[in-house]
Image: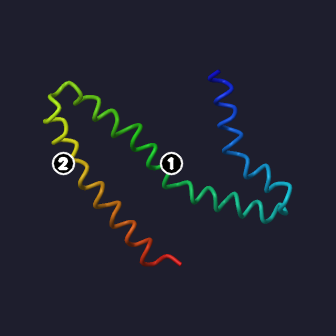
Amino acid sequence: MIFVSTALTFFAEQADRLILGKLLTLDVLGVYGVALTLADIPRSITLALSGKVMFPAISKLVDQPRDILRAKILKNRQPILIACAVGLTLLVSFGV
């Protein structure tokens, strides 16, 4: 069942390239591939940070009482939210 789910997820993620491969020329499809890769960078960074930094850090603190754990998470969350807000503000302000 997991194999089927993984295969369906893979094909769903690649469906745009399969469909557009029949509709577009190779030049335009190449530009689309580059643009898709550049657009995927923020998602990849977020997944890498959460999987390799945030979740392991939180899992080390999970044995603490809930109120202390919540306070530590909220304290460390604020700089991340501020950085994201600044980045989003720049994108909205200077985007086309």
Disc 2 crowd, CA 10 A, few/some/many (<14, 14-19, 20+): few
Question: Mark 1 = which residue?
Answer: 44
Q: CA distance from mark 1 to mark 2?
A: 24 Å
**Mark 1 residue element:** helix
Q: Mark 1 is on which residue type?
A: Ser
**Quadrant of res 29:** bottom right
Q: How many marks?
A: 2
Q: Secondary structure at mark 2?
A: helix
Determine the residue positioned at 64% across, 62% down. Answer: 35
Which residue is located at x 70 percent, y 61 percent?
A: 32
Locate residue 30 relative to residue 79 in the image: left or right: right
Quick one: label 1 or label 2, which is nearer the N terminus? 1
Q: Position of residue 90 (x, y in %)?
A: 40, 72
In the rendered image, which quarter contains the N terminus?
top right
Amino acid type of the residue tagged 2 in the rendering: Lys
* Residue 94 point in image, percent of width and height: 45, 78
Q: Who's the residue at 37% across and 71% down the image?
A: 89
Residue at image location 21% in from the left, 47% down from the top: 74
Left or right side of 54 for 42: right
* Residue 51 found in image quarter: top left
Residue 96 on image: x %, y %: 53, 78
Eyeballing the image, is 56 above or below 22? above
Q: Quadrant of residue 38?
A: bottom right
Say the numbered circle drawn on residue 75. 2
